[in-house]
Amino acid sequence: MSLPSVPPTTVLVVDDSAFNRRSISEILEASPDVRVVGKAGDGEQALQLALSLKPDVITLDLEMPKMDGFTFLRILMSRLPTPVIVVSSYSAKENVFRALELGALDFVAKAEQKSEGDFQGIGRELLSKVLLARTLKRGVFVARPQLDSYSGHDSVPPRSGEPAAPRQVVGIASSTGGPTALMQIAARLPARYPNALLMSQHMPEKFTRTFAERLGRRSEIRVREATDGDEVVGGLGLICPGGRCLTVEAGAAGAAPRARVKPPAADDRYVPSADQLFASLARTQGSRAIGVILTGMGDDGVQGARAIREAGGVVVAESDATAIVYGMPGAAVRAGVVTHSMALPEIAEYLRALR
């Protein structure tokens, strides 16, 4: 008996450039698992088509006439929450993160030049993220909060005195859906937070510094992109640079630990590697090591989480009640390496209360 066939993922392509619309459509329709059901050149037309066609996923350019991508996202997410993949240039990094806060699922970065080769270069990534829509739990996606109403901070708050060694070092792993989850966590931490956060977010290089700056504006702790040799001190969050791996090494007696930023190893399946980060926490922090696995595809963090548990530390996984993509936390749960499974707001409160 033959198995029932899976219907193709339906996509609405939105871009003010006819060249881009054609290129993106050709990339997607090269897969038998995707069917482009509509194309729109401005936000107004895109909204009409989205509401009538109800596609599984939308690819979105943010700079459009009549109605820009941000307005489109606000209206779409209030009327018909739909997975949106932003297709943006490297020069529009701030816009990408604003779109994620408004409800976009993920983004793909394209080169500035308009040529067939440039779009083919992002084809595999774009296709995989479009197909990810098949795995999303619709109820979780619809219910997740947006962050645009949060005013944030104009600058990093001052701290008095010398930076102190952290009471505990927390490693956080995240991928798809991770930027907004990290925003929600960072926004809950107090200015005098005694612990340090090391964050391994799967993200392209050139975007992580902008993300760290934006995260810092949303939080009362200091956040920046990590550099090799940074002191790991209380009240500091470090984001692993894209294309690199972040680990921690013990400092001298009584001194703060140090961050190490290095190229990925040949056997690293994910970059940045949460496995590397967690394993270094297990080595240097022992029973005080804390690993947190948030939403994301794949199983990055499972091996490192096992090392933390074997060292006597704690591993927290985001539950499927809030994880946009339950791949990473789900893999850790199935591997039996998770101490606590919590919804995202509970994780934020857990880390806030950590002393």
Image: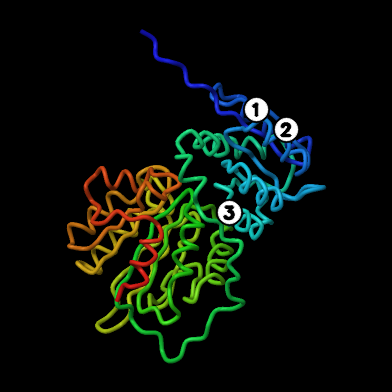
| Residue identified by numbered label 2 | 39
Q: Position of residue 210 (x, y in %)?
A: 59, 64
Identity of the residue drawn at 58% across and 75% down:
153
Task: Tell me the tag on residue 100.
Answer: 3
Dot 1: what SS?
Answer: strand
**Left or right: 159, with 312 as reference point:** right
Identity of the residue drawn at 56% across and 41% down:
83
Q: Position of residue 180 (x, y in %)?
A: 51, 57
Split into 4 quadrants, where in the image is the C terminus?
bottom left
The answer to which image quadrant residue 272 occupies is bottom left
Q: Position of residue 140 (x, y in %)?
A: 46, 45
In the image, residue 350 above or below residue 56: below
Dot 2: what SS?
Answer: strand
Outermost residue toward the front in this view = 79
In the image, residue 296 above or below residue 230: above
Marks 2 and 1 in Cβ contact (< 8 Å): yes
Q: Position of residue 66 (x, y in %)?
A: 82, 47
**Left or right: 103, with 19 as reference point:** left
Split into 4 quadrants, where in the image is the N terminus?
top left
For marks 3 and 1 on the same chain, the one whose residue lies earlier in the sequence? 1
| Residue identified by numbered label 1 | 36
Amino acid type at mark 3:
Leu
Measured Cα–Cα span from mark 3 to mark 1: 23 Å
Measured Cα–Cα span from mark 2 to mark 1: 8 Å
The one nearer the camera, 331 or 345, is 345
Mark 2 Cα within 10 Å, few/some/many (few <14, many 20+)?
A: many
Amino acid type at mark 2:
Lys
The one nearer the camera, 111 or 342, is 342
In the image, residue 238 above or below residue 136: below
